[in-house]
Structures are given as structure tokens and as C-alpha cells.
Amino acid sequence: MRPLDEQRVSCPYCGESIDILVDQQEAGQEYIEDCQVCCKPIVFNLSVDSMGHLTVLVRDENEAY
């Protein structure tokens, strides 16, 4: 079992840095979680690049993808 990876992202609404824990097995998935600071919904997209590094992209729920 792989440990969870800690990632730091910026809220697309308030700009505050947020630490999150992600599981590399969730790569390819999208989920929504509220910002811990401003409570607005952040859309998270998880992917793994060709080198096997986990990438977390965030956007607000109204932003076109």
C-alpha cells in the first residue's frame, strides 16, 4: 500500500494555500472539496505524468475545463 502524497494547492477563489492528502491510485479522477478557508467548492483533477509524478490541478466550479 502506497502512502498518501501531500500536495499544496492554491484556492482558485481566495488564493489561500491549502495542504491536501491525495492517493496516487485516484489518478484520472475528479472530485470536489470545499476550501478550508473560504468554504467555496474547488474542483480537483488528479493525474500522473509520464515520469510517474502525481499532478493536482484545481479550478473553480464555474471555470470551463
Image (cartoon, rainbow, N blue to C red):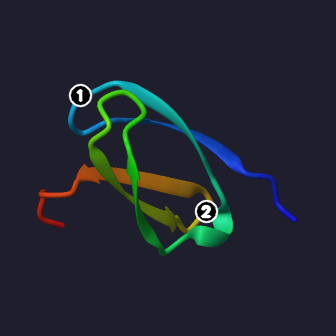
Along the line of sight, the residue nearer the viewer: 21 or 48: 21
The structure residue drawn at horizontal position 46% and vertical position 53%, both measured from the top left corner, is 56
Q: Furthest residue to the front? A: 39
- CA separation, marks 1 and 2? 31 Å
The residue under label 2 is 51
Q: Image point 48% across, 63% down: which residue?
A: 46
Q: How many marks?
A: 2
Left or right: 16 as drawn, with respect to 13: right
Q: Residues within 10 Å of mark 1 (few under 14, many from 20)?
A: few
**Callout 2 amino acid:** Met
* Residue 7, horizontal then vertical, whole percent: 56, 40
The relative height of residue 20 versus residue 55 in the rendered view (above or below) is: above
Q: Position of residue 10 (x, y in %)?
A: 35, 33
Q: For the point 27% across and 42% down, which residue is it?
A: 40
Q: Is residue 23 above or below residue 16?
A: below
Helix, strand or loop for disc 2: loop
43 left or right, relative to 5: left
Instruction: Give the SS element for disc 1.
Output: loop
Q: Indicate the quadrant where residue 27 lies.
A: bottom right
Give x and y (percent) for residue 58: 33, 50
**How packed is label 2: few (under 14 Cα within 10 Å), some, or many (20 or more)?**
few
Residue type for callout 1: Cys
Q: What residue sits right under mark 1 in the picture? A: 14
User: In front: 11, or 53?
Assistant: 11
